[in-house]
Structure formats: C-alpha cells, structure tokens
Image (tube, grey):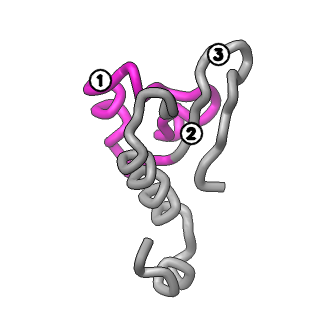
Amino acid sequence: VFTIFADKHHGDTRTTVWLPVPDGLQPGLIAATPQTFFSPPYLGVRGWVGIDLATIRKADLQYHICSAWSLIAPKRLRAAHPEI
C-alpha cells in the first residue's frame, strides 16, 4: 500500500489521501502548508502525511503519489517503470 484514500475519516470533514514521504520531510510539509498537509491518524507517527484534496494542485498531488510509490515499490518494479 502506498496511498490511502480517506473520505471524511472518523468525522473529519475533508477528503484526503495519506501517503509516505521521504524521511524527515513530513514536519516541513506540515509547517509550510498546514492547510494542505497534516499528520494522519495511525500513520503520521511513521512519517506519512495526509493531503487535503481540496487544497492541492493536481500536478503537486501527482508528484507526491509518484514519490510515495517510489518509496514503497520493490527495486525491480521501480526499474521496470522508470517513467514514474
């Protein structure tokens, strides 16, 4: 699993995606853009971020999803798909 879609999870009013980011990046993303990035329940302690889909540009979301896939995918699978 490299992304989780959460629609109003446990009473949250947002529609979001949760995904892993490179080590150390989570605090900076949240501090710089708290209206878009947040620490999701359960996975925030593992360095994942939540992204509010209503506040992020499509190109930025695509970048973060591709980056998350690259962090999780096995080496051979990444090598077979260099375009990602």
Considering the image in quadrants, where does the C terminus appear? bottom left
Q: Are marks 1 and 2 in contact (CB under 8 Å)?
A: no
Q: Nearer the viewer, residue 60 or 2?
A: 60
Q: Residue at x 56, y 74 (%)?
A: 74
- Separation (CA) of disc 1 from disc 2: 17 Å
Considering the image in quadrants, where does the N terminus appear? bottom right
Q: Residue at x 73, y 18 (%)?
A: 10
Q: Which mark is residue 12?
A: 3
Based on the displayed image, in which of its 4 quarters is residue 35 positioned?
Answer: top left
Q: Residues within 10 Å of mark 1 (few under 14, many from 20)?
A: few
| Disc 1 target residue | 31
| Disc 2 target residue | 18
Rendering coords of residue 23 (x, y %):
37, 48
Magenta-highlighted residues? 20-49
- Separation (CA) of disc 3 from disc 1: 20 Å
Under tag 1, what secondary structure?
A: helix
Q: Are marks 3 and 1 in contact (CB under 8 Å)?
A: no
Rendering coords of residue 3 (x, y %):
60, 49
